Amino acid sequence: MTDFVLVPEAHTGGWVWGEVADRLRESGAGAHPVTLTGMRGHGAPPGPGTCLETHIRDVLRVVDALDGTDVVLVGHGYGIHPVVAAADRRAGRIARVVHLDAGMPQDGDPPLKLVPDQELRERFSGPAGRSGGDRRVAPPPPGAWERWGSTAGVPGDALARLAARAAPQPAGTLTEPLRLSGAGAALPTTGVLCTGNGSSIALVEGLVSLGHPGLQALTEPRVTFFELATGHWPMLSVPGELAEVLLRAAAGEGHRITATGEPPAHLRPFLLDVPERPRERHGRVDLYLPDAGGPRPAVVFVHGGPVPPGARPTPRDWPAFVGYGRRAAELGAVGVTLDHRLHEIGDFPRAAEDLAAAVELVRADPRVDAERVALWFFSAGGLLSADWLAAPPGWLRCLAATYPVLAPLPNWGLSAFRFRPASAVGGAGALPIVLTRVGRERPEIAATVEEFLAAAEHGAAAVEVVDLPDGRHGFETTDHGEQARGAVERALRTVLGHLRF
């Protein structure tokens, strides 16, 4: 018989698994919801020094009390940290580890690193905060649970129960570094991704294709994936579907990411056949120069991410950005590409600084007309557009975005207004905005585009939409059809038109 050990998200207890546990037992499996120390219910009250190690021991006690070796550990959100540590110490007893809408914690990382609540991360970022001490972190107030992940699909009564039964989290459970020996690294693993919270198999496949060494293990046969079309709390929103997925995961089912040996999508040829152009490299910035003399307008192309710091080639050498830079130069503008440091979700402020520095460098170049510049954002780089939308400078003649993310996804924890273009567009005034929308976009990203367009309409912003109904995210290197080429050309010529050639 398979025994499922169910470890909950922060601020909650074993009670949150009630319906899922019942359905697992009805199927003939064992179900063992865990209430971690200090989290109310049957757990011991928190005492001085309650920390991550305390919660690891809680999980180990449950594992050690079970017979047999067909034990599946399920960690939801924060709960994945004591789960992977317990699996590391009892690798011979564990049949599978399930990451339920949870990250991939690494040795030496405190759980706080993967907490989506940005304000909480900042509060504990200093040396005093990292020590944790005996402080306790209050749960989100009613109506603010989105800080810990999307509540999409959770019925009102269940959401009220979540708020009413939530318990303060001992700070040491979030700030103590995770310690792993590597003994559990080869265990079968399943990721259950909640698309309503911003996760998806397509997103994981895209990250793997970027060459991050820490993600290459996800292509191994022992690793499987499932998606659930709900928010971060599937045990409350879709308990039956979650129980079914857990049973299938225990049986070894699920989607597998395979390495095909072919170039990843972002390294395939650009859809336009653009001749080579002179290129100059200035630190993080590349300039593609037109033939025309005199100061020329410039278009700055801003890549998305996160892109791992060790990814090679870097984005400015990806065929799509090389192609855009060359084509802009061919049409008479200075094409500009850059490598900004969006390596992790928390790096948006640093990436924004890199972009601002690149713009300053470009506008200071005597070959550039400093009063005629366009900024063009791609994918998650779209969040960087908020700075420029909120208060457009006079020299910014056009802002473009292609398959952009225009509001933070729920599990990114970016609550600040600064990186919310859908909120900032109200300040855009008469700034021309050219948005290329792909019809086969990932639903979680498409929702941010529609939110942005609704806000733009309400604020009377000047948005022109270039629609590519059959297009996908990153289509420039995967679709060389006439419609795709036409969409790129139309967007380019529209942007350059606003630069008043």
Image (cartoon, rainbow, N blue to C red):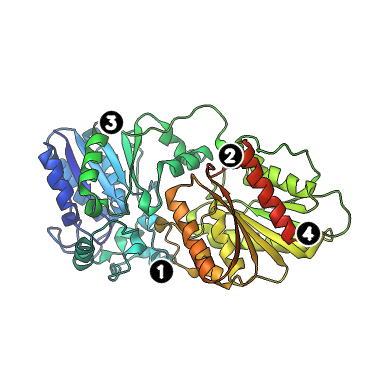
Q: CA distance from mark 3 to mark 2?
A: 31 Å
Q: Position of residue 166 (x, y in %)?
A: 22, 65
Quarter of the image for the N terminus: give it: top left
- Which label sits on residue 252? 3
Q: CA distance from mark 3 to mark 4?
A: 56 Å
Question: Image point 66% across, 59% down: which residue?
Answer: 375
Q: Nearer the viewer, residue 89 or 21?
A: 21
Image position of 363 (left or right of 78): right
Residue identifier under label 1 = 123
Q: Regarding mark 2 in the picture, which secondary structure is present there? A: helix
| Disc 2 packing (10 Å; few <14; some 14–19; many ≥20) | many
Q: Regarding mark 4 in the picture, which secondary structure is present there? A: strand
User: Which is nearer the N-term, disc 3 or disc 4?
Assistant: 3
Question: Image point 67% across, 42% down: which residue?
Answer: 317
* Residue mark closest to the camera, 2 vs 1: 2
Asked if disc 3 and disc 1 are in contact, CB closer than 8 Å, the reply is no
Question: Image point 36% across, 34% down: which residue?
Answer: 255
Q: Indicate the amino acid at tag 4.
A: Pro
Q: Regarding mark 1 in the picture, which secondary structure is present there? A: helix
Question: Image point 50% across, 64% down: which residue?
Answer: 422
